[in-house]
Image (cartoon, grey):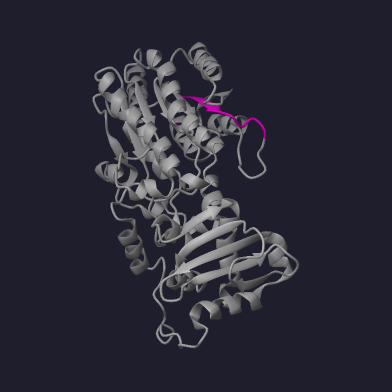
Amino acid sequence: MLIENDKACEIILKIRKLAGRTLFITGASRGIGKAIALKAAKDGANIVIAAKTAEAHPKLPGTIYTAAEEIEAVGGKALPCLVDVRDEEQISEAVKNAVKTFGGIDILINNASAINLTGTLDTPMKKVDLMMSVNSRGTYLTSKLCIPHLKKSANGHILNLSPPLNMNPVWFKNHCAYTMAKYGMSMCVLGMAEEFMGEIAVNALWPKTAIHTAAMDMLGGSEVSSQCRKPEIMADAAYAIFCRPKSFTGNFVIDEEFLQTEGIRDFDVYAVEPGHPLLPDFFLDEDPVSLAKKMQDYGATPKFEAGKQQVSATAQGPVAETFKAIDGALTPEVVKSTAGVYQFELSGDHPGTWYIDLKNENGGTGQGSFPGKADVQMNMSSEDFVKMFAGKMKPTLAFMSGRLKIKGDMTLAIKLEKLMTQLKSKL
């Protein structure tokens, strides 16, 4: 009977591959970091939640303490640590507490990240410093402080949530600072994998598609969720990486492709809305415009319906007709909830400057520059402008593919996509 119990325990331990192992995860209070934590916790792992949210945020759900409760509820042990990865003293103290509490560190996940998708002239140095400090420096610093303990682990791993080093200029031209900061995390993989070969596995993990998190909602609006996968796909991929030996190192892993090698075939289970076309993530394709077109063909941005493709050639043209329809659809409620002025610099067959005033009195539209300061400026072709307001093109896709350039308040820019959804039936 004792032998049978011993065998049963052995089988359980084999299934629960991360049981008793300690994971140090930055930014683990929500999103992908928390999903990885919960996946490991189900094995009985120890989770160090190294994040800076101790009190509930009005827009972002979760704190280090609520995450700890969830981790312990599924069978893990949690150590919530208030950590800003820009602060060496805070990271050092969290590492010491982790070792004191759990006896060591087996896995480091550098998940904490800052993002600001603006061009060079529109990115304040405060934002540049934030992205460099959190993404590049924070990853390097946290790794440096954890490595002495990871080297003592039987199967030490570092996993950075960062992309492959794609040097296509298209990924730099619209948000150079963010790309530099994010690639800094990837360069840590490149260097540290070689430096600690045979001692620690150092890899990167990046999603093939957009992942639905609170940050994605802030970037693309709540409507973007149907085009995303759940964070669990990244958690499953990370788990599979941690189960590999430390000889598996220096890899830039893409979640879907890696899980396919693990025998996963059904990826609909990860979709927020199964069957819906998915938004590709940054940095993976070599031609974002072509990829966006493939998505349009697949249905993400449907083609014009028969009979609507040809717009009658009036003196005003389709752009003027679109603005006229927008003007007629505006309400005081829309103006109050938006509180911004948008200026459009259009090129193509119907070039010109137009604006939508959603800040003053009852709002309105007009041709020419706004008589004052616009909060957001959008540059695009007149054809794409008409498609966007007709619901034939997603602003998120247009921005990712470089067909839409945005200057100014990005929060207000995001609001415009929500407004388009509200106005689509009236246009």
Write down the quadrant of residue 70 in the picture.
top right
In the foreground, 40 or 123:
123
Q: Locate residue 389 relative to residue 176 in the image: left or right.
A: right
In the foreground, 423 or 214:
423
Q: What stretch is highlighted in magenta?
A: 42-55
Write down the quadrant of residue 59 in the picture.
top right
Q: Which residue is drawn at 62% across and 68% down?
A: 356
Q: Which percent across, then down, holds residue 406?
A: 50, 56
Q: Which residue is drawn at 25% across and 23% down?
A: 194
Does residue 19 show up? no
In the foreground, 51 or 85:
85
Does residue 53 show up? yes
Q: Which percent across, then down, holds residue 307?
A: 42, 87
Q: Which residue is drawn at 32% across and 29% down?
A: 189
Look at the image and say whether residue 105 sits in the magenta stretch: no
In the foreground, 120 or 146:
120
Q: In which quarter of the image is the N terminus?
A: top left
Q: Which percent across, then down, holds residue 217?
A: 54, 51
Q: In which quarter of the image is the C terminus?
A: bottom right
Q: Locate residue 130 relative to residue 18 in the image: left or right.
A: right
